[in-house]
């Protein structure tokens, strides 16, 4: 009996050790993004707009959408996430980061201290970003004004407040592959890059499972709003009958084909798309029109 | 037979109940405010289709549509947005509770619609190429308010 107990204890310890190892943060190799030769801030500004950084990181009541002081709250069934200060302030923001730190955050969801970020920060989409776009975005973000506002902690329920568990979550859900596997022409590829990487549309328009992972087999088929109020509409052809031009016009003006106007967080998204080149709105429309209908349950 | 009759009665009862729940009437102020937004949408549609070349430009029709939008923008919103008619209180509205938490902010956004509508009224009859930018301004006023005060679907 004692021998059996000892054996079980050993198995439990080994299992715990394995979980600990599997859940470890997986940062980029030190050589990647090691040298910061300086990016193109003008190009970075477009990437910043397309990626919607300001939409979540500007202060809640601020008209200045370029002061990335953080503080907006995002309620969810796991608790409330609070966007941190990502302005170039050296202590309160990310001013003391290296390019490598920045790339680790965007592409791996790992902080400079080697801790997991929660996927409320959509690195699950940004993982598909082009390396040069990361470099250019970093060079632009560093030109923005600094805010000395301290980042507020998230208010998450147990066990979701244990960050280490995100290592397991990432094993399940951090997937760099494109969802729309084939994109033949240049416009469609650009649309796929905008939708699946920069603009991270899937983070709200795709339903999540019980652990908060995106259901890739129900991609962009809509679902309950993450904050529990209302629904995020489906973009798949079974639900959305808008024409290519209707989609592009909506992204420019916020007007639906019936001249209703966007509400909620989509307003911020449209403000971003309105400032991108018309070809980008066109590319997103091409991507949306190329979506397959979701498989029946 | 008796069981079947009871079952039928029960089913019918349930169906009536379900229909009644679905057809629950929204309070008059909510219907009125939704109606005014529908009037806005219909008239924006007339102008938008002209601006996007989906309909032939007609200066007179454009002016009437713009005048109507101005008229709607002059409606006093307070009686239509009565306390207790937010999306938290009722099904069938997307009006967020923030409207009542920050009534002055909401009123300011409604006034923003008025300014954009007045601009549109000035240029509506001046040609189709004038419509696009003025509609863009107006759409901006819609979004500026919806950002904070309207819930997603």
Image (spheres, coloured by chain):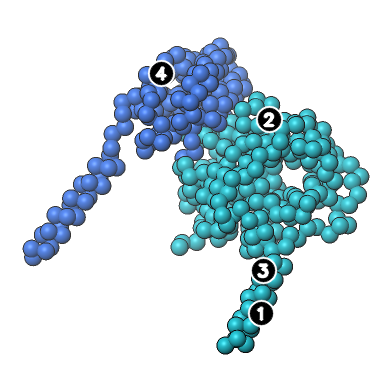
Q: In the image, which disc is placed on residue A10?
A: 1
Q: Is residue A18 visible?
A: yes
* Depicted B106 relative to depicted A130: above or below: above
Kind of element beneath mark 3: helix
Check the residue under mark 1 and report the chain it is in: A
Of all chains in the rendering, the one displayed in blue is: B
Label whose residue precedes the other's in the sequence (2 or 3): 3
Q: Are marks 3 and 4 on the same chain?
A: no
Q: Seen in the image, is A295 located left or right of residue A25?
A: left
* Disc 1 from disc 4: Cα separation: 70 Å
Marker disc for residue B78: 4
Which lettered chain is shown in cyan?
Answer: A
Disc 3 or disc 1, which is closer to the eye? 1
The label shown at residue B82 is: none
Q: Earlier in the sequence, mark 3 or mark 1?
A: 1
| Disc 4, SS | loop
Measured in 3D between alpha carbons, the distance from the residue under mark 2 to the one under mark 3, in whole angstroms, is: 41 Å
C-beta proximity under 8 Å, tags 2 and 3: no
Seen from the viewer's position, the closer of residues B93 and A182 is B93
Q: Is residue A194 above or below residue A45?
A: below
Q: Are marks 2 and 4 on the same chain?
A: no
Q: Chain of mark 2?
A: A
Q: Residue at 28% x, 34% y: name it.
A: B25
Q: Which residue is mark 2?
A: A65
Q: For residue B5, which quarter of the picture?
A: bottom left
Spatial distance from mark 3 to mark 1, Cα to Cα?
Answer: 14 Å
Q: Which residue is mark 3?
A: A19
């Amino acid at each position: 009996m004692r021998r059996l107990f000892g054996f079980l204890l050993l198995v439990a310890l080994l299992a715990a050790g394995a979980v600990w190892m599997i859940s470890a943060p997986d940062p980029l190799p030190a050589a990647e993004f090691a040298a910061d030769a300086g990016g193109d801030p003008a190009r970075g500004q477009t990437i910043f707009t397309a990626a919607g950084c300001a939409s979540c990181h500007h202060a809640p009541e601020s008209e200045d959408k370029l002061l990335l002081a953080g503080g907006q709250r995002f309620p969810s069934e796991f608790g409330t996430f609070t966007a941190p200060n990502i302005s170039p302030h050296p202590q309160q923001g990310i001013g003391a980061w290296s390019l490598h730190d920045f790339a680790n955050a965007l592409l791996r969801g790992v902080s400079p201290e080697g801790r997991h970020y929660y996927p409320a920060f959509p690195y699950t989409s940004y993982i598909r970003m082009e390396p040069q776009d990361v470099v250019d975005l970093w060079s632009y973000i560093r030109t923005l004004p600094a805010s000395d506002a301290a980042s507020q902690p998230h208010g998450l329920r147990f066990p979701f407040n244990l960050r280490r568990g995100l290592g397991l979550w990432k094993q399940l859900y951090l997937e760099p592959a494109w969802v729309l596997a084939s994109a033949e022409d240049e416009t469609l590829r650009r649309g796929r890059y905008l939708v699946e990487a920069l603009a991270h549309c899937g983070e709200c328009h795709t339903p999540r499972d019980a652990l908060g992972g995106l259901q890739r087999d129900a991609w962009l088929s809509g679902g309950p709003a993450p904050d529990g109020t209302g629904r995020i509409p489906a973009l798949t052809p079974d639900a959305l009958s808008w024409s290519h031009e209707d989609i592009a016009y909506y992204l420019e003006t916020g007007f639906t084909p019936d001249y209703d106007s966007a509400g909620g967080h989509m307003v911020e998204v449209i403000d971003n798309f309105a400032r991108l080149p018309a070809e980008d709105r066109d590319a997103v429309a091409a991507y949306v029109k190329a979506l397959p209908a979701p498989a029946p349950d | 037979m008796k069981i079947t009759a009871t079952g039928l009665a029960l089913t019918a009862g349930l169906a009536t109940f379900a229909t009644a729940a679905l057809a629950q009437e929204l309070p008059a102020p909510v219907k009125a405010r939704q109606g005014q937004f529908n009037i806005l949408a219909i008239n924006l549609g007339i102008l938008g289709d002209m601006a996007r070349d989906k309909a032939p430009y007609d200066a007179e029709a454009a002016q009437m549509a713009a005048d109507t939008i101005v008229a709607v923008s002059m409606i006093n919103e307070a009686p239509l947005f009565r306390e207790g008619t937010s999306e938290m209180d009722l099904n069938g509205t997307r009006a967020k509770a923030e409207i009542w938490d920050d009534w002055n902010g909401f009123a300011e956004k409604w006034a923003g619609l008025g300014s954009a509508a007045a601009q549109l009224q000035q240029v509506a009859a001046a040609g189709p190429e004038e419509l696009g930018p003025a509609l863009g301004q107006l759409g901006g006023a819609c979004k500026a308010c919806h950002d904070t005060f309207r819930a997603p679907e």
